[in-house]
Image (cartoon, helix red, strand yellow):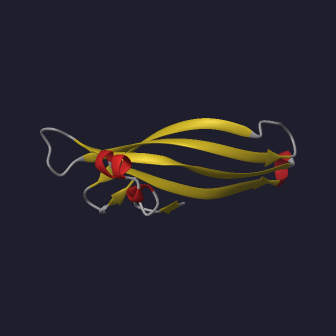
Amino acid sequence: MHDFNGAFLNKIPFFKKIGLREVAGAGFLIAKERNLRYAELFTGVERVFKYPFNLLGKFKVGFYVVGSVANQFRNPVQFKFGITAWDRKRGRWF
């Protein structure tokens, strides 16, 4: 997963104000015992929100378009969303 931190969307004035960030990534899974091979590519946008009464707490909400290929099922394009919390102790996203 790669976070571009607004490198493309910050060039557009409206998107810079609302704080959208673009992300892209890939993943794969090989499970020999089930004869499964699965791969996916995704891209999307995320927005970081801060908790109103907890200054150190924050979370991000993302919307993604996912393309996948597999040898056992067919679902080439999907739309997904995710919610991720910030880990204050480790200084990274869960």
**Would residue 14 appear left or right of 80 to someone viewing this image?**
left
Q: Relative to residue 75, is residue 34 depicted above or below?
A: below
Q: Where is residue 22 in the image (x, y as percent from the top left)?
A: 47, 54
Q: Which residue is drawn at 26% across and 60% down?
A: 89
In which image quadrant can residue 91 be found? Answer: bottom left
Q: In this view, does 83 lie above or below 56?
A: above
* Residue in the foreground of this view, choosing between 11 and 78: 11
Asked if residue 36 lies left or right of residue 47, the reply is: right
Q: Residue 49 placed where, x, y %?
A: 28, 43
Residue 46 falls left or right of residue 56? right
Q: Which residue is pictured at 71% across the width and 46% down the height?
A: 67
Of the 4 image quadrants, the one containing the N terminus is: bottom right
Asked whether, in this view, residue 24 is left or right of residue 14, the answer is: right
Q: Which residue is pictured at 25% across the width and 56% down the height?
A: 88
* The image quarter in which residue 65 lies: top right
| Residue 6 percent across, percent down from the top left | 41, 59
Residue visible at 58% across and 51% down? 43
Can you name the residue that lies furthest to the front here? 13
Q: How many labels does the image show?
A: 0
Residue 70: x %, y % from top left: 82, 46
